[in-house]
Amino acid sequence: MGLIKRFSGEVCYLELNRPEKRNALSKSVVIELTRFFRESHDSNQFKVLVISGNGGFFSAGADLEWMKSGMSQSESENLEDAQLFNKLYSTMYNYPKPLIVKVDKGAYGGAIGLMACADIVTTTADAEFQFSEPMLGLVPATIAPYIIRRIGLTMTKQLFLTAMKFDGNEAFNYGLVNYLFSEEQLAIKTRELASTIIKNSPSALKETKLLLNRLGNYIVPISEEEEQHCAGIIARARRSADGQEGVKAFFEKRKPEWNDL
């Protein structure tokens, strides 16, 4: 089971459940997560959703075993896979209930996309983050619109093009994270935030999110055409020579040998 779901009062706690893979986002997990958002969209069972990772680490991003399988897939099959991420991020971003992401230890690549689609993100100062896709010959295409919306184009360029690691303090300063807590207080303070939110009117919260997302769309619109374009970029990258070399080098634990442009 890729997800663990439990309820505490009017809060739903959803855990990514692949601790042996650092909660990497496999195809089945992406589908399962998207289905959860859709099926609970109008649920009266809870008012606030908190997402975290089981096993002490939030998520390593897209499962590289899944990316590796793209080497033998056609471009249309890779495009279909990329569209799964588009659907996940779009469904999550437009989710009507307040959504908190609690990040233990860190997040990479596509998992930072989950953070960017959340309303509130909590983590610790020493958590580690990285947009590692370029190091693998890949492109952080499907998350790009949401990262730009969250932290702006200038900072997105810096983090994407350098693929540098950054910590929780930096993530807070960039605007990726809302709250920094100690490791001992992270779970407690995140629960307190959820408890604070559920005191408010559910209908008012829903309308507020709809309003803010609508206003946000005027600032950084994400059209279906743009989603298709982003999906096409990552689909081509997965089949490219550098994409195949980067993923292959990762599994062979060696430095990749890039092709010249």
Image (spheres, rainbow, N blue to C red):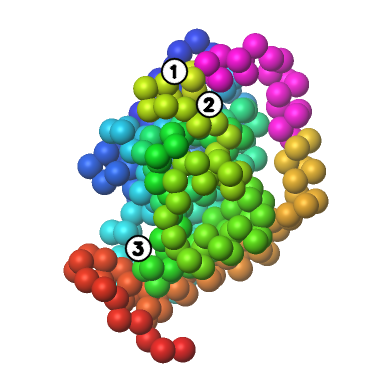
Q: At x 44% / y 60%, what residue is drawn?
A: 164
- Which residue does the image show at 31% across and 33% down from the upper left? 56
Q: Amino acid at mark 1?
A: Ile
Residue 27 in sight in this render: no
Query: Does residue 180 appear left or right of residue 90 in this picture?
Result: left
Q: Which mark is residue 98?
A: none
Highlighted magenta segment, given as a residue range: 192-210
> Is residue 97 depicted above or below 19 in this figure?
above
- Going 80% across and 51% down the picture, which residue do you hit? 218
Principal secondary structure, stretch drawn in magenta: helix
Q: Which residue is mark 2?
A: 49
Residue of label 3: 67
Q: Which residue is mark 1?
A: 188
Q: Could you tell me residue 11's position as x and y percent?
A: 51, 18
Earlier residue among tags 1 and 2:
2
N-terminal-most mark, 2 or 3: 2
Callout 1: few (<14), some (14-19), or many (20+) C-alpha neighbours within 10 Å? Answer: few
